[in-house]
Amino acid sequence: MLLESRKSVSYESLLAKAVGKIEQLGYSEIRADLEDYEKPFELKGKTNDINFVPDLTARKGNSKTYFEISQKVEDTRELVNKWKLLETLSKMKNGNFKIFVPHGQMKFTQELIEQHQIRAELEKI
């Protein structure tokens, strides 16, 4: 399901916009599934056999930040598992977890992170 949302044209334009934003904020070592960038590393979930790939990763100083682009999906289980994994990794690495929220997706995103107690910074994109 998450892979399907990544194949849309709007996802790529949102990803490019997010990369531009984090470059302006002074991040380095940016990884994204875009031309001219290395892909982020695949992460393995502990509770199931599903592997996750963050939308973006970058470094600022000594900390690593994981970035996601929020997209509405019918079945949120996989999305919640991915976000919880990224939140945990960011804590372990003294980093951050940020979710870029496109127009019209803020309520969906806020309800999801509140309902599942996911600590993430939300940023409009």
Image (tube, grey):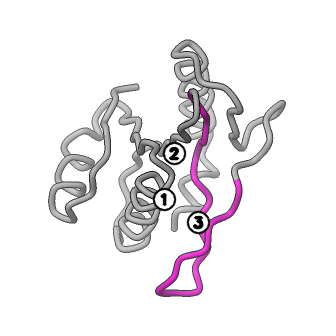
Farthest residue in the bottom direction? 48
Q: Which mark is residue 89?
A: 1
Which element type, helix, strand or loop, lies under badge 1? helix
User: Which class describes the residues within 10 Å of circle 3: few (<14), some (14-19), or many (20+)?
Assistant: many
Read off the residue under disc 2.
Answer: 66
C-alpha gap between disc 2 and disc 1: 9 Å
Is residue 101 rendered magenta in the image? no
Amino acid type at image mark 3: Phe
Q: Contact (CB < 8 A) between labels 2 and 1? A: yes
Which element type, helix, strand or loop, lies under badge 3? strand
Residue for point 53% across, 54% down: 5
| Direction from residue 78 to residue 55 in the image, left or right | right
Residue for point 62% across, 27% down: 16
Numbered range of the magenta stretch? 41-60
Task: Report the front residue among 90 and 39.
Answer: 90
Horizontal and vertical percent for residue 43?
62, 66
Quadrant for residue 75, please give it.
bottom left
